[in-house]
Image (spheres, grey):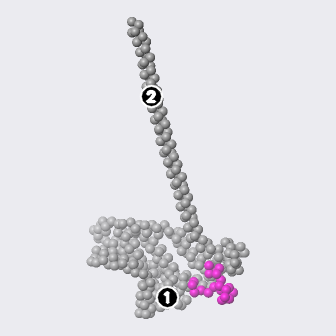
Amino acid sequence: MEENKNLNVETPNLEEATSKYSALTSANNSLAAALKKDAATYDVKKVERNAKIQKTIVTVIIYAFLFFLAIVVIFPFYWMIISSLKTYDEYILSTPTFWPTQTVYWKNYVDAYSAANLGLLFLNTVYVGLVSTLLSLVITVLSAFAFARLEFKGRDSMFAFMLATMMIPGELFTITNYQTVIVFLDWKNTFTALIVPFLVSVFYIYLLRQNFKQIPNELYLAAKVDGKTDMEYLLKVMIPLALPSLISITILKMMGAWNSYIWPRLVTDDTTHKLITNGLRGASFFVDGDENKINYPAQMAAVVIVSAPLFLVFIFLRKYIMKGVSRSGIKG
């Protein structure tokens, strides 16, 4: 009886110990899980923090490099502008100044305009640029439409041959064009010699053809069902859809005419047909008529006047250039 009594007394102690052990084990497991979770969270945060630091360092290095390149590119233009505002005496100082210290000499621009006869040069360049751009656009649009939509024998072979001509150095074309224009056609000192030889551009035809290829062929077939001619389809459908590329071609063609130097210098040697680049090169900039003193500030002022239109075109129309080129680069 006593033994049974003792068993009954000790049994609750065993159950209580077992319960406490289970609770302790559960607490230890919970603590271990919490510690493991905290450690994992700490590792994730540490990795994220390191990645963020690395990203910040890389970004700073990239922007510092871009800033350095921007300084290298912008500094010549800055030097050109401040030099155009200096007097001749300040310009020839042994220690250069980074801003006009004596006076801001705006008269350099007046001297540059009169010395280089910029009015006539501007008119000639604008005339040649507009006429060549309009005629080149007509040729480019018609050629690109033919290579993109019309079916005729030898189309792809002809287009591949045209693309192959892009591999030929431009100097070879200059030699052959000069022989044709001067020797056979006798177009020396004429605007025709400045306009005709470069009306066809394989690059512009390729650029516009790629844009035309993006337009679904079903539109062309539907226009044919409606009784539209190829010219009506081109004018009413394809040209409006390819307008960004046409704007890009127009801008690039005008800029090419504005910057042309070698060809105008070869085919023109009189003042009435000179363009802005070769006319500026042949202008005389002297200080008080002294041929031993070249008025470099006036030269810089002339370069600023000539460069300003290109800067304005790029600033206000750059999005059209990028949009047109990017659209033409997508496979149709």
Instruction: Check the picture and name the quadrant holding the N terminus.
Output: top left
The relative height of residue 67 versus residue 1 in the rendered view (above or below) is: below
User: Regarding mark 2 in the picture, which secondary structure is present there?
Assistant: helix
**Mark 2 Cα shell of 10 Å, populated few (<14), some (14-19), many (≥20):** few
Q: Residue at x 43, y 72 (%)?
A: 246
Mark 1 or mark 2, whichever is nearer to me: 2
Q: Is residue 301 magenta?
A: no
Q: Which residue is mark 1?
A: 266
Would residue 98 be found to the left or right of residue 184 on screen?
right
The residue nearer to you, when weighing 57 against 187, is 57
The residue nearer to you, when weighing 148 against 48, is 48
Give the residue type at disc 1: Leu
Q: Given the current orientation, which residue lies at the most extreme top position?
A: 1
Q: Given the current orientation, which residue lies at the most extreme right position?
A: 102
Q: Residue at x 57, y 84 (%)?
A: 281
Instruction: Check the picture and name the quadrant holding the C terminus.
Output: bottom left
- Marks 1 and 2, how far apart in space? 98 Å
The relative height of residue 86 versus residue 285 in the rendered view (above or below) is: above
Q: Which residue is mark 2?
A: 25
Q: Residue at x 61, y 75 (%)?
A: 80
Q: Position of residue 235 (x, y in %)?
A: 37, 72
Q: Is residue 293 magenta?
A: yes
Q: Position of residue 284 (x, y in %)?
A: 62, 87
The residue nearer to you, when weighing 234 against 201, is 201
Give the residue type at disc 2: Thr
Q: Residue at x 56, y 58 (%)?
A: 60
The relative height of residue 250 versus residue 197 in the rendered view (above or below) is: above
Q: Is residue 235 visible?
A: no
Q: Position of residue 104 (x, y in %)?
A: 69, 74
User: Regarding mark 1 in the picture, which secondary structure is present there?
Assistant: helix
Q: Which residues are magenta?
A: 280-300
